[in-house]
Image: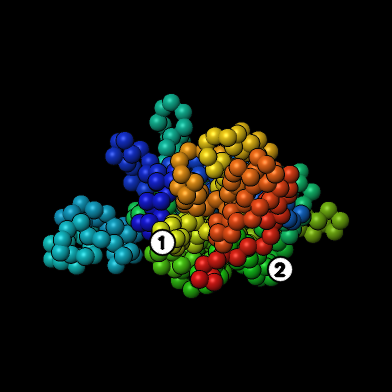
C-alpha cells in the first residue's frame, strides 16, 4: 500500500487533501492522472449500464434531499456504527473493529489491551453528516448529505414510470458523491468520508428477483475481470444472515484481495420492496408499477449492484502495480488495462532537434483527436519511457531520424517492451485496433 500511496502522489494521481494546512484525515484530492483514470472507470461503468444494454436509464439526483428521505430509508434511526472512546489516549474506535485498530499508547497494540486503556461503553454513532438549509438554524432546517446515491433513485421512481417508457425489469443508474462520517478511516482511498458511488437499482417483478440477483452477480464479476482485475484476486462472498442490512434478503459482496486483505469492492443486494414501500408510506404517494393493458399492479423488487469509484480505482492501481528490471535497471510500471490507462499514447521525439519535434507535434495532433495522448520532449528517452510506464501508458511512439526519411515511427509496448515500426499514416488505426483487443494482465503469466 505504501508504494501505491507514494506513486500516486509522485505521479499526480492522488494527493492528501489540504496538505499545506497539515492535511485533513482521510480526505484526498485527485490529480490530473487520477481524474483521467477515475473518468475511465466511470466511463466503463456507464458503458456497461447504458450503451451495452437497453433496459437501464441514467439519473443524477441531488446530494441534499428532503430529510424525510432518511426517515423512510431507515438511515436516521439505523445507519450507525458502535463507537467507543478511550479516556486515556483520547482516540475513538469502532467497537466492532478493536482488533484491527491501533491504540494511541504504547506498549498496547489494540485498544483495551493494557490496564491504562480506559474505554467508554459503546454507543451508536450516526454516520450521516448533518447541516442546515437557509440562513437560520431553526426547526425543520436540518438536512443531511446523502450517505448513498440509491435513495435519489427511489425518490424518482414515479418520474421514470411516467417518462421513460420502461417497465420492470428495468434499471436506473447513477454515479455521484456520497458522504459518511466514518469513525475509523485510513487505508488511503479505501475508506474516506467523502467518496463516489456507482449504483444501479434494477426494478423487477417480485417472482423474478432471485433470477435477476444471480444475473447481476455474474454480470458485475465479469465487468471487473473484463477490465483486467486478476480473477484469483477477486471473489464473490454471500453475507451471513447476521451481516444483512435491515432492507436486504440476500447480499453478496464482490471482494478484492487488497494489501489489507480481502475487502468489499461492491455489494450486490436483493432489497425486496423495502425502499419503494417505505417511501410510499412516508410520502403518501403510490410507488408501484401498473400494467395499463391488464390493470395489474405491484411494487417491484429491487436488485442493487453498488460499487465505490475510489475503491475501484484503488483495486485497479493495486492490481496493476508491478516492478521489473530492464537492462539491469529497476522499473516501476502500472499494468493497467489500456481502456483504463489515463493516457493511451505518449509521443516522444528521440532528440530535440533535426525536425523531430516538429514531426512529433504533427503526430501528436493527429492522435489526440482519437485518444488521450501526451507529448513529451524533455530529457533522456529512457527517463521519458519510465515516466510513462509509471502512469500506465500502454504505448509510446518515438520519432527518430528514420521517421523524417520514411514517415515511420517506432511503437513501444509497455508490457512486452516490443518495438515495431509503423507508418505514421497507419498509427491511429493500429492504436485503435489494439485498444479494442481483449486484454489480460501480464502479471497472471509472471
Ligand atoms: P463497508 O462495509 O466497507 O463500510 P458498506 O457495506 O457500508 O461498506 P455499501 O453501503 O454497500 O458499503 O456501499 C457500496 C460501495 O460503496 C462499497 O462496496 C464501497 O465500494 C463504497 N463505499 C462505501 N463506503 C465507502 C467509504 N467510506 N469510502 C469509500 N468507498 C466506500
Along the line of sight, which residue is nearer the eye, 195 or 38? 38
Q: Position of residue 341 (x, y in %)?
A: 56, 51
Residue behind mark 2: 208
In this rendering, would 111 be left or right of 309?
A: left
Q: Position of residue 354 (x, y in %)?
A: 58, 35
Q: Quadrant of residue 225?
A: bottom right
Residue behind mark 1: 328
Along the line of sight, which residue is nearer the eye, 264 or 155? 264
Q: Secondary structure at mark 1?
A: loop
In this rendering, would 82 be left or right of 254?
A: left
Along the line of sight, which residue is nearer the eye, 221 or 210? 221
Q: Position of residue 147 (x, y in %)?
A: 48, 49
Along the line of sight, which residue is nearer the eye, 7 or 180? 7
Kindly identify the residue that appears in the image at 15 percent across and 64 percent down: 107
18 over 231 or under it: above or below: above
Q: Nearer the viewer, mark 2 or mark 1?
A: 1
Give the CA distance from mark 2 to mark 1.
Answer: 59 Å
Kindly identify the residue that appears in the image at 68 percent across and 46 percent down: 408
Earlier-in-chain disc, 2 versus 1: 2
Kindly identify the residue that appears in the image at 46 percent across and 67 percent down: 257
Point out the residue furthest to the right here: 293
Amino acid at each position: 500500500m505504501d508504494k501505491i500511496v507514494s506513486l500516486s502522489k509522485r505521479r499526480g494521481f492522488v494527493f492528501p487533501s489540504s496538505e499545506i494546512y497539515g492535511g485533513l484525515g482521510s480526505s484526498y484530492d485527485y490529480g490530473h492522472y487520477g481524474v483521467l483514470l477515475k473518468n475511465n472507470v466511470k466511463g466503463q461503468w456507464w458503458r456497461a449500464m447504458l450503451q451495452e444494454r437497453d433496459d437501464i436509464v441514467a439519473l443524477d439526483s441531488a446530494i441534499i434531499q428532503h430529510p424525510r428521505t432518511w426517515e423512510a430509508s431507515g438511515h436516521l434511526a439505523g445507519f450507525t456504527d458502535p463507537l467507543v472512546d478511550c479516556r486515556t489516549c483520547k482516540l475513538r474506535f469502532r467497537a466492532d473493529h478493536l482488533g484491527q485498530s491501533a491504540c494511541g499508547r504504547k506498549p498496547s497494540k489494540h485498544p483495551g489491551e493494557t490496564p491504562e486503556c480506559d474505554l467508554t461503553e459503546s454507543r451508536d454513532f450516526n454516520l450521516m453528516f448533518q447541516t442546515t438549509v437557509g440562513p437560520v438554524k431553526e426547526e425543520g432546517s436540518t438536512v443531511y448529505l446523502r450517505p448513498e446515491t440509491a435513495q435519489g433513485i427511489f425518490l424518482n421512481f414515479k418520474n421514470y414510470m411516467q417518462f421513460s417508457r420502461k417497465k420492470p425489469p428495468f434499471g436506473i443508474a447513477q454515479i455521484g458523491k456520497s458522504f459518511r462520517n466514518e469513525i475509523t478511516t485510513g487505508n488511503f482511498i479505501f475508506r474516506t468520508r467523502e467518496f463516489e458511488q456507482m449504483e444501479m437499482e434494477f426494478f423487477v417483478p417480485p417472482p423474478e428477483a432471485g433470477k435477476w440477483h444471480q444475473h447481476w452477480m455474474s454480470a458485475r464479476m465479469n465487468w471487473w475481470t473484463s477490465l483486467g482485475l486478476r480473477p484469483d484476486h477477486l471473489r464473490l462472498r454471500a453475507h451471513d444472515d447476521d451481516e444483512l442490512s435491515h432492507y436486504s434478503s440476500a447480499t453478496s459482496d464482490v471482494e478484492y484481495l487488497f494489501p489489507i486483505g480481502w475487502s468489499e469492492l461492491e455489494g450486490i443486494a436483493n432489497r425486496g420492496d423495502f425502499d419503494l414501500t417505505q417511501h410510499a408510506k412516508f410520502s403518501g404517494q403510490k410507488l408501484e408499477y401498473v400494467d395499463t393493458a391488464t390493470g395489474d399492479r405491484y411494487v417491484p423488487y429491487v436488485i442493487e449492484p453498488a460499487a465505490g469509484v475510489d475503491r475501484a480505482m484503488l483495486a485497479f492501481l493495486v492490481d496493476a502495480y508491478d516492478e521489473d528490471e530492464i537492462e539491469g535497471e529497476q522499473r516501476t510500471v502500472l499494468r493497467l488495462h489500456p481502456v483504463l490507462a489515463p493516457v493511451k499514447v505518449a509521443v516522444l521525439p528521440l532528440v530535440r532537434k533535426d525536425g523531430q519535434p516538429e514531426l512529433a507535434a504533427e503526430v501528436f495532433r493527429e492522435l489526440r483527436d482519437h485518444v488521450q495522448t501526451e507529448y513529451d520532449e524533455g530529457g533522456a528517452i529512457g527517463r521519458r519511457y519510465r515516466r510513462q510506464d509509471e502512469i500506465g501508458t500502454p504505448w509510446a511512439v518515438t520519432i527518430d531520424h528514420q521517421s523524417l526519411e520514411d514517415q515511420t515511427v517506432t511503437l513501444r509496448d509497455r508490457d512486452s517492451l516490443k518495438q515495431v515500426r509503423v507508418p505514421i499514416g497507419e498509427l491511429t488505426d493500429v492504436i485503435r485496433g489494439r485498444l479494442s483487443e481483449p486484454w489480460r494482465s501480464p502479471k497472471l503469466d509472471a
